[in-house]
Amino acid sequence: MRAACRLSLNAVTLAMALGAAAVAIANPPERLEREALRVCADGNNMPFSNRAGEGFENRIAELMADEMGVPLTYVWAPQVMGFVRNTLELRVCDVMIGVAAGYGFVQNTNPYYRSVYALVVPEDSDLEVASLGDAALTGRRIGVVAETPPIVPLRRTGARIEGYPLMVDTRVRAPVRDAIEDVAAGNTDGAVLWGPLAGYYAARQDPPLKVVPLVDDDTGATLDYRITMGIRHGEAHWKDWINDFIERHQEEIDAILTEYGVPLLDRHGQLLDSQAGGGGA
């Protein structure tokens, strides 16, 4: 009986050791020395990033690499379903520069900006609204990206929705740019889009379009989001370093974002003082 117990105990011990080894292989220890800043990014996703380094996430990544004193390298992939699995989880890169707080597939750093959805209209438009529940939107043709928060309140208000796809291969399609160009061409009365996209593309129309950040929306829809950087779970030292970087370089980061027309909110959900008079674009 004792021999059988010893055999059973040995078997359990061996299974636990093998399990621990498998976990260690699947989750190797955090790298404390980094020979490069390896960024997971979409190569055609302005104003966030592109292969030419023209996006604001590219600019922020350059700041980080300079601070670390290492080269900046990228792993490019369309930011569609499977992006995290095919980049960060494969350990071919170490950070995603822009991730909404609470995104469960990554470990979030502290936020480095907060922005809000915005209404984009022609400069001479008579559509003056502060909320997606405003009756002035009833019957108006409004562009919205599919499955984004503005759709439900706009439908309740009676707006005529012009939809654009959410998940696309950015090498082939640019739905937000299409939505903005439809406003400029008069095909739609306006568009409600994520603030960084709205500000960037509206400023590039001739003449530029007006951007109205929806900071006073009262429909209950979640329209403002904190944006973090995303890293792998279990990398505490890397997270601490990035959080410290964000804190020390916040003013430089804000200046970059403002240059790209990103509507920036303070901790109370209101436009930063530097943007409050400019409509966020």
Image (cartoon, rainbow, N blue to C red):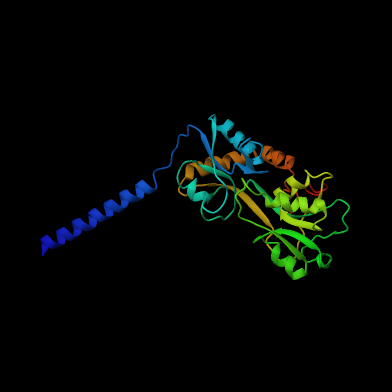
The picture places residue 48, in percent across and down from the top left corner, at: 65, 43
Count of all numbered marks drawn on residues in the image = 0
Depth check: 58 or 176 in front?
176
| Residue 265 left/right relative to 187 | left
In the image, is residue 158 above or below residue 215? below
Depth check: 212 or 277 in front?
212
Query: Can you see residue 266?
Result: no
At 57% from the left and 49% from the top, the residue drawn is 79
In the image, is residue 221 above or below residue 46? below
Can you tell which quarter of the image residue 147 is in?
A: bottom right
Can you tell which quarter of the image residue 3 is in?
A: bottom left
At 28% from the left and 51% from the top, the residue drawn is 18
| Residue 259 left/right relative to 210 | left
The picture places residue 41, in percent across and down from the top left corner, at: 57, 43
At 74% from the left and 65% from the top, the residue drawn is 154
Depth check: 113 or 106 in front?
106
| Residue 165 left/right relative to 1 | right
